[in-house]
Amino acid sequence: PPNPAGVDESECADIRNITWQEYRQRTNKLQVQYLLLTRSNMDCAQRFNQNSLSTAQQSYFNVSHPTKVIVHGYRTLGTKPSWVKDLAQALLRVQDANVLVVDWVYGASFAYNLAVENYKEVAVQISVIINELQKHGCELKSFHFIGVSLGAHVAGFVGTLFRGKIGRITALDPAGPMFKGADTFDRLDPSDALFVDAIHTDADYFGISIPVGHVDFFLNGGKDQVGCSRSKFTSMYDYVICDHMRALYVYMSALGGSCQLTGIPCGSFEDFLRGQCVDCDIFKGTCPTIGLSENCGIPAMSPIPKEQKVFLITTSSAPFCVHHILLVLQVSALDKSAELEVTLTVDKVGTQQTLNLQTDTTVYKAVLTHPAALCHIHAIQLKNTGAWLYKQRDIHVKSVCLSEIPALRREQPLCVHNVVIRRGTPWSHDLVQVCHTF
């Protein structure tokens, strides 16, 4: 596209770093700045302010396009967030939009409690820009805020200022410290936009543990993320923020669309793992997905259910997707407790889970995961493990059934009946690779 008059490609705008010395000598001004990225300038951000649309310098901003507003969070060391351009470009590859990046590093650095004191003033300043864009023809419902950590609550307060009429807020591990017990006026909540979705990955530390949107995705329970182990990082800082930042990287990966990250509503992660939640009836049978689909892909509903916790399991690296497979096991009554190791394999890739069988229960459910869809899993293996003296010797399995959740098609479970699992002798069965449909 032609370069708009007055825009110098050689001077791309960027978020600033703030040194400790600059921070100590700070004035009372927050120095909030805005950067604009569009499909016409994906690699070269343009400085943007409330006068950008009415001055002689032509802006890349297109009032007929939707606007994404990225709001970063607390910056411990005063450094600019390195991920902003990647997120903006990921959004632009999916949608022809204006992407406004809010640079408030100056007010977000070094002291967390002071950054929290600043967040509402930042929201007020952002609202001035929104008001100006409205005068030029932008509708409130065309704004989609994407707030990371403390930035999610900034976005929420912008929504409060506009009485919940902005289109959407997506919160990427919204900040927990100083917010969990806060009034809804002071933190993100479902009333802040027409639709609010959140991804939780560090609910026991930097993130918030309560639902704050219409749909709240709790990845792996929302606390400890796969692959965030101390040994993999060169610094304690990277280790500490690994869980917290996983929400951002999962979201960016989901925008790429190589696989769907789908959540299932449930009361708790423990109930989800026990196979107690397998459908999305509360959303008219359609499960919400992470990404840019309108309302996370759930059908139009009035009112939209709110504060719905949905759960999914992810892997440690992009694209983060696994298939969730429901195991239903029925056994004859046992004289002693037992351990049954279940393995699903495709070629040499196997995933294992151990079930603890008790004398007072004959039906067991569990959610297993595998990189492959159920239709492509080659075999299931059952192994009777545990101590020789104190565990059940033979286990009579009346039936073992597998089904993918949420069901993508109306599939019958894949079942095997009447199997005796002897201790020390693994049993395996080839699974039919063609899915049965009604």
Image (tube, rainbow, N blue to C red):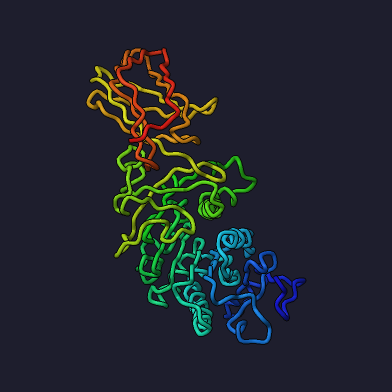
Residue 390 visible (yes or no): no
Q: Residue at x 68, y 87 (%)?
A: 56
Q: Residue 47: x and y, percent?
A: 65, 75
How many marks can you see? 0
Q: Residue at x 41, y 77 (%)?
A: 162
Rendering quarter of residue 187: bottom left
Q: Which of 283 and 365 is in front in this view?
A: 283
Q: Nearer the viewer, residue 364 or 44?
A: 44
Q: Residue 230: x and y, percent?
A: 57, 42
Rendering quarter of residue 94: bottom right
Q: Nearer the viewer, residue 65 or 78?
A: 65
Which quadrant of the rendered structure holds the N terminus? bottom right
Q: Horizontally, is 261 left or right of 266 in the view?
A: right
Q: Horizontally, is 321 left or right of 388 in the view?
A: right
Residue 101 higher or lower than 236, as above or below: below
Q: Which residue lies furthest to the front in this view?
A: 438
Residue 8 visible (yes or no): yes
Residue 5 higher or lower than 418, as above or below: below
Q: Which residue is drawn at 52% across and 69% down?
A: 115
Q: Nearer the viewer, residue 339 or 65?
A: 65
Residue 244 higher or lower than 375, as above or below: below
Q: Horizontally, is 84 left or right of 138 in the view?
A: right
Q: Which residue lies furthest to the right in this view?
A: 10
Q: Residue 78: x and y, percent?
A: 62, 65
Rendering quarter of residue 381: top left
Q: Residue 422: x and y, percent?
A: 36, 13
Which quadrant of the rendered structure holds the C terminus? top left
Residue 284 higher or lower than 355, as above or below: below
Q: Which residue is drawn at 41% across and 50% down?
A: 218
